[in-house]
Image (cartoon, grey):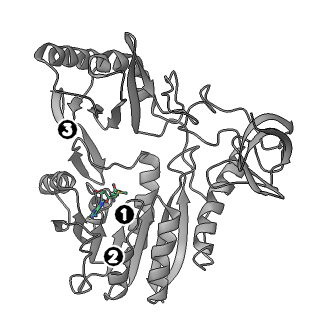
Amino acid sequence: MGDTQALDIARLGAQGDGVADTPSGPVFVPYALSGERVQADVHGERARLIAVMTPSPDRIAPVCRHFTHCGGCAVQHLRSHAYLAWKREMVIAAFASRGIDAPVAPVASVGLGARRRAAFSARRTGRSVVLGFHEAKGVEIVDLQECPVTASAIVRVLPGLRRLVEPLMSRRAPGRVIVTLAANGLDVAVEDVPGDPPPDVREFLAREATALGLARLTLAGDTLYQATVPAVRFGTANVVLPARSFLQAAPVAEAEMVRLVTQAVVGAKRVADLFCGMGTFTFPLAQSASVLAVDGDKQAIAALQNAAKRTPGLKPIEVKVRDLFREPLSARELQGFDAAVFDPPRAGAATQAQSLVDSPINVVVAVSCNPATLARDARILIDGGFKLERVTPIDQFLYSAHVEAVAILRRA
Ligand SMILES: C[S@@+](CC[C@H](N)C(=O)[O-])C[C@H]1O[C@@H](n2cnc3c(N)ncnc32)[C@H](O)[C@@H]1O
């Protein structure tokens, strides 16, 4: 037990916790809201909410029965306008911390059921399996009965997936079950499970996959069952999904990102698409510009290249497999390009941003799921002579503390 205190919540922190400023420093109270007076059990700078004494007018009922138990969502209990303002503020603060007074647009919102990929954890308990996300506090897995942020086609198969993965799961360590709603069905990838299943288990898995109507089932990257080749559509291209490659989490967020990227580079004849993945931006860009698409994931690049060969009516697409952290595209290699798009993992693309500064490129669109590294990379570009035109936050990760953003920079 900690120390029970009444606290006044001053703001919502970056992880979605209510923050009370006390004489001994900030205290973080999960599920408390800005402006509320709450009773909390305080342990150092963390506290457990006991009761809301004065609720915020923006407090609403959560949409999911698992909220506060499941770690998938941090903020479901806040009215939409205040929730979106919190996400926007995170982006503004990240840029401000780099000394940038950023022109940040309103957040592009994404509705319920938009998530097309979910990475669940699963563990055997007795004769059954629990399948879901990890607890908000603690290490157990919440056995999901619903998930309003995830596509209903995924949520519907959870009971069947519990049956399917049962022979693969151990009591000791959790396995992972990554479910993707492709354009033509569900692609299920099971990872981090022990051993190679014997023939009878493989037969069982194929039978259950058929019964569930899955498009494909892979185990540690190997295809165990395939009814149809799972594919996604980028622009006019159908790209066959590699088992493990990156895919934007929500198609409506992706569509907004594509719109912002393609509009920013209108008129460009040659575009470099860096950290291109399977071609989310490459194919829409290639409708009007030739594109150099670069990524470190061999499978993603192969999928992109195969789709490019099959898709008529596109400008030329050249591809490279390359580790852009160790070997960013150099200013020399960027000669002749009018624009660049980069969409790195959370670590950002500092060295790549520096060589963009040294290149003749006039327009850079930076896409990121981490406002902190996005702001750092924007600072490099701004110091190198670019002007930040606009940053658009996109609520791709509904109810979590994450936010996607697209920044457009042009040479001043
Ligand atoms: C956020 S994803 C974006 C992918 C793509 N632009 C999209 O929208 O689907 C980041 C991409 O960076 C790639 N990546 C990660 N580390 C890399 C590295 N060191 N060099 C090159 N690419 C890398 C991943 O393979 C992944 O495709």
Residue 204 left/right relative to 86: left
Q: Residue at x 47, y 32 (%)?
A: 133
The residue identified by callout 2 is 352
Amino acid residing under circle 1: Pro
The tag earlier along the polypeptide, 3 or 1, is 3
- Give SS at disc 2: helix
Instruction: Specify whether tag 1 is near ligand 1 (CB below 8 Å).
Output: yes
In the image, residue 168 sits, relative to residue 116, either above or below, namely: above
Front residue of 1/354: it is: 1
The residue identified by callout 1 is 344
Residue 221's tag is 3
Which class describes the residues within 10 Å of circle 3: few (<14), some (14-19), or many (20+)? few
Looking at the rendering, which quadrant does residue 232 occupy? Answer: top left
Q: CA distance from mark 3 to mark 1?
A: 23 Å
Q: Quadrant of the N terminus?
A: top right
Q: Position of residue 361 (x, y in %)?
A: 33, 84
